[in-house]
């Protein structure tokens, strides 16, 4: 299948189909799987690879070579099928298993069975929406372990023209600028001497409290 990353999406409801199409748009190779034959037939030509089988059946997963994929997204509405697929993918050595959880109980069971990441699409979307309402600068928001977050913001006016070292964001707020997108260029771990320019997109990591303090002072 070439050198491009390979993903499988199990369950082609609204969330799964959106994930599959986004991955394809980003240049990945994607296999879409759903138990509904009528649905998979309707997606022929929309997704580059789509098949139908009972996702709880280990033989079906073996036939598509699920263990060879870089990551699998499990977006099944049926709890039993989702957990079974999680366990089967784990047993076959899939390195990244992302499970769309129905509730916290589902999430906990999925983690125990091998999920490396659990998402709650409605809850996560709500958090992103609230973050945009609360933070006038936030472009995006990513939840990490515990209270640690990454936010993406457009550089505030108060920082334009100042260097990273002059701004002293680590000393003042205990937050770290991990990357800067300047025009079409993205700088990872930017140099302390870099001066912020208008329109720069900053990627900042910190705790909820430290990021909130930073936001209050803008």
Image (cartoon, rainbow, N blue to C red):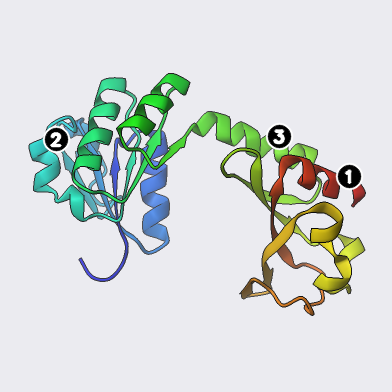
- Judged left or right of residue 63, residue 151 is right
Residue 216's tag is: 1
Q: Mark 2 points at which residue?
A: 53
Residue placed most toward the observer, 179 or 4: 179
- Per the model, the C-alpha gap separating discs 1 and 2 is 52 Å
Location of residue 53 in the rendering, given as x and y in whole percent from the top left corner = 14, 35
Location of residue 127 in the rendering, given as x and y in whole percent from the top left corner = 64, 34
Disc 1 packing (10 Å; few <14; some 14–19; many ≥20): few
Location of residue 207 in the rendering, given as x and y in whole percent from the top left corner = 71, 44
Q: Residue at x 26, y 49 (%)?
A: 94
Q: In this view, does 143 lie above or below 173?
A: above
Residue 75 occupies quadrant = top left
**Sequence order check, earlier mark of 2 and 3:** 2
Q: Mark 3 points at which residue?
A: 130
Q: Residue at x 29, y 35 (%)?
A: 11
Residue placed most toward the observer, 27 or 41: 27
Residue 102 occupies quadrant = top left
């Amino acid at each position: 299948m070439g050198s491009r990353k390979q993903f499988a999406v199990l369950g082609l409801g609204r969330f799964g189909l959106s994930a599959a199409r986004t991955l394809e748009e980003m240049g990945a190779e994607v296999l879409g799987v759903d138990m509904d034959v009528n649905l998979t037939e309707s997606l022929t030509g929309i997704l580059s690879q789509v098949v139908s089988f009972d996702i709880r059946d280990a033989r079906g997963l073996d036939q598509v070579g699920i263990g060879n994929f870089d990551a699998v997204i499990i977006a099944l509405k049926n709890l039993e099928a989702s957990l079974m697929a999680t366990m089967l993918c784990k047993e076959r050595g899939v390195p990244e298993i992302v499970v769309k959880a129905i509730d916290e109980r589902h999430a906990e069971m999925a983690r125990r069975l091998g999920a490396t990441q659990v998402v709650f699409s409605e809850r996560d979307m709500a958090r992103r929406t609230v973050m945009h309402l609360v933070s006038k600068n936030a472009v995006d928001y990513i939840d990490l372990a515990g209270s640690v977050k990454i936010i993406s913001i457009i550089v505030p006016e108060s920082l334009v023209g100042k260097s990273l070292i002059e701004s002293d964001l680590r000393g003042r707020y205990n937050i770290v600028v991990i990357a800067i997108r300047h025009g079409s260029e993205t700088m990872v771990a930017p140099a302390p001497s870099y001066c912020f320019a208008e329109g720069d997109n900053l990627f900042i990591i910190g705790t909820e409290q430290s990021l909130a303090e930073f936001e209050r002072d803008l």
